[in-house]
Image: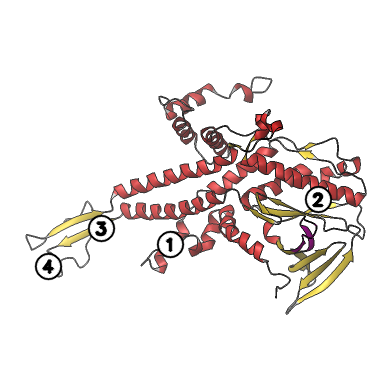
Amino acid sequence: MTAINQQNDTVKRMAEAWAVIDPLMGGTQAMRKAGKKLLPQQPREDDEDYEYRLGTATLFPAYQRTCTVMSGKPFSKQMTINEDVPPKVKALLPDIDGQGRSIHAFASQLFAEALSHGFGGVLVDFPAEGGQRPYWTHYAHDSILGWRLDTSEGVARLTQLRLHETAEVEDGDYGVKLVQRVRVLTPGGWALYEQGTDSWALVDEGVTSLSYIPFVPYYGRRVAFMEGAPPLVDLAHQNVKHWQQQSDQDDSVRFARKRLLVFTGVNEGELASPSAGAAYALRFENADAKAEVIQGSAESVTVGRSELEALEDQMIQTGAELLVKQPGQRTATEASNDAEANKSTLQSTVEDFEDAMDRCLQITADWLKAGDGGTVSLFKDFGAATLTDASAQLVLSLQGAGMLTKETTIVEMQRRGVVGPDVDPEVEIEKVQAEGPSLGSMNGDGE
């Protein structure tokens, strides 16, 4: 029997990817907290050595930065509110969540989650008591617990939905504490349960004027109704591999830097407490005695660095694939319009997300009895014809996000044929600095 706060099988299946993605999005500290789940302890590595290695490991944030760059592209220009949005609905858009966020800011957060985790949802609510207006509430991927569907009419329709919430309540005269709640929605009704010491208790309930559950899911890659997948999940696993190999590389560098003194043929008692340095000399009775220094091989460090660089390039290529236009099945109408026929994965994801926002507008209009809710449009002119063009575009975006140095960016552009092979990165950067600010960055006073 499923408990009220238990995830259903679909959510558990999606959560397998989130277990990798959440730490990657949280950065180095979150990755260290994940411990052996993402950085396994090596064979015959004792606990003390492992804890030291884990505590010094640092994350190359490829997944986080790529998701940030990609999710920002459709919001690099203001969302277009089309003329078909009714005035009553349009008046709410500058503060769509009732907390001061515009629909553009609100939607950008949702789309970032769609790309990073592949799933999330919006509840379009209208409080029965004291509610002056509908408002949108974001429920993150891990706040959606489970649901029931009706497919009898050929279209999936929610008949029950469970959402996890936390609420801050008073605790004593001055303190506050967080309590766990589950909101259960049904067509035309809702109930709120709160976790007690031994069980979940009903604390509130009510009815609505809508004959359906006013909830809209959105996806990174739609698998089925109420099931999505992160479009960059392969990049996430590559980033974990980089995390592990970077730790191995750090360990190799640390070992290579250490020197080990080895003595052979030494009589007992001659090296009770050996010392080394320019002011010390060693004298042994045995003429065959030797003192040697053994040091780790620098070759292994070089090989490890090359492997990391190759993996970093793979991650750039994987992220760039979202921007490459993919030719697909073309209708007669599409055949005359290459822009419609050839869309990148990111462009298709944006279109699906626009549909989700349009559905939210329609629910808002239903609450207000305003008829058709209208549509919105996002910027989508960012597709690339080839993987080389797409990866070059992503390299520039990552450099702008502070993830790549200017020198590395020039080298990467040379590898892609965008910059000539005879360009010296260091000299080029010095010339750019000597020229001063670009013309486009100067104001009207020439400053």
Q: Is residue 367 among the parts visible in the rendering?
A: yes
Disc 4 crowd, CA 10 A, few/some/many (<14, 14-19, 20+): few
Q: Which residue is mark 2?
A: 97
Secondary structure at badge 4 equals: loop
Identify the mark nearer the N-term, 3 or 2: 2
Identify the mark nearer the N-term, 2 or 4: 2
The quadrant of the rendering that contains the N terminus is bottom right
Q: Is residue 82 above or below residue 229?
A: above
Identify the mark nearer the N-term, 1 or 2: 1
The quadrant of the rendering that contains the C terminus is top right
Q: Is residue 365 above or below residue 444?
A: below
Q: Which residue is mark 4?
A: 267
Outermost residue, bottom side? 198
Question: Which segment did they paint magenta?
Answer: 148-160
Identify the mark nearer the N-term, 3 or 1: 1
For the point 22% across and 66% down, the residue is: 273
Secondary structure at badge 1 equals: helix
Q: Which residue is mark 1?
A: 52
Tell which tag, 2 or 4, sits nearer the viewer. 2
Give the spatial CA distance, label 1 vs label 2: 45 Å
Amino acid type of the residue tagged 3 in the rendering = Leu
